[in-house]
Image (cartoon, rainbow, N blue to C red):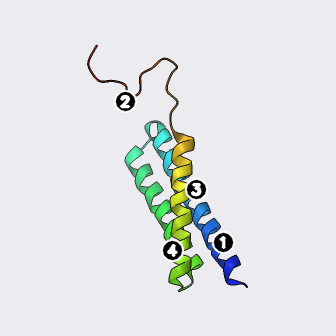
Amino acid sequence: MPESLLSWTAVLAGAGLGAIYFGGLWWTVRRAASFRRPVLSMLVSVWLRMSVALGGFYVVAGGNWKRLLLCLLGFVVARVVVTWLARSPTPSGAATATEVLHAP
């Protein structure tokens, strides 16, 4: 397989791993209050997400440090995207944190 195709595959795999990791984090945090045992659920969630991410990094890298870095790049890009998608919208007319300079 050509090296450029392997590079893009590593970036896309990293993005997929990041989407799973950070999407799972977002889902878990949103649902934690409704879980019967929230602490146990959070621990299981972090264990599963870390296992998938680290296992995916190991498989994608295949002993090649360049593919590992490219996979990490895709992972970080997915973090930015999921963070942007999961941000909570501010109600219209509400001041943002940078606009609030004093108490009312």
Give coordinates of residue 103: x percent, y percent: 26, 17
Q: Amino acid at mark 3?
A: Ala
Q: Residue at x 58, y 78 (%)?
A: 59
Quote the CA–CA distance across marks 1 and 3: 16 Å
In the image, which disc is placed on residue 8?
1
- Label 1: element kind: helix
Identify which residue, 15 or 70, lies in the foreground: 70
Quote the CA–CA distance across marks 3 and 4: 17 Å
The answer to whether the residues at label 2 and label 4 have Cβ atoms under 8 Å apart is no
Give coordinates of residue 31: x percent, y percent: 50, 40
Give coordinates of residue 92: x percent, y percent: 52, 19
Quote the CA–CA distance across marks 2 and 3: 27 Å
Q: Would you say 61 lies left or right of 97 here?
A: right
Quote the CA–CA distance across marks 4 and 1: 12 Å
Q: Would you say 90 lies left or right of 98 here?
A: right
Q: Amino acid at mark 2?
A: Ala
Q: Nearer the viewer, mark 1 or mark 3?
A: 1
In the image, which disc is placed on residue 97?
2
Q: Is residue 7 visible?
A: yes
Q: Amino acid at mark 4?
A: Leu
Q: Is residue 58 visible?
A: no
Q: Would you say 97 lies left or right of 102 here?
A: right
Which residue matches tag 4?
69
Q: Nearer the viewer, mark 2 or mark 3?
A: 2
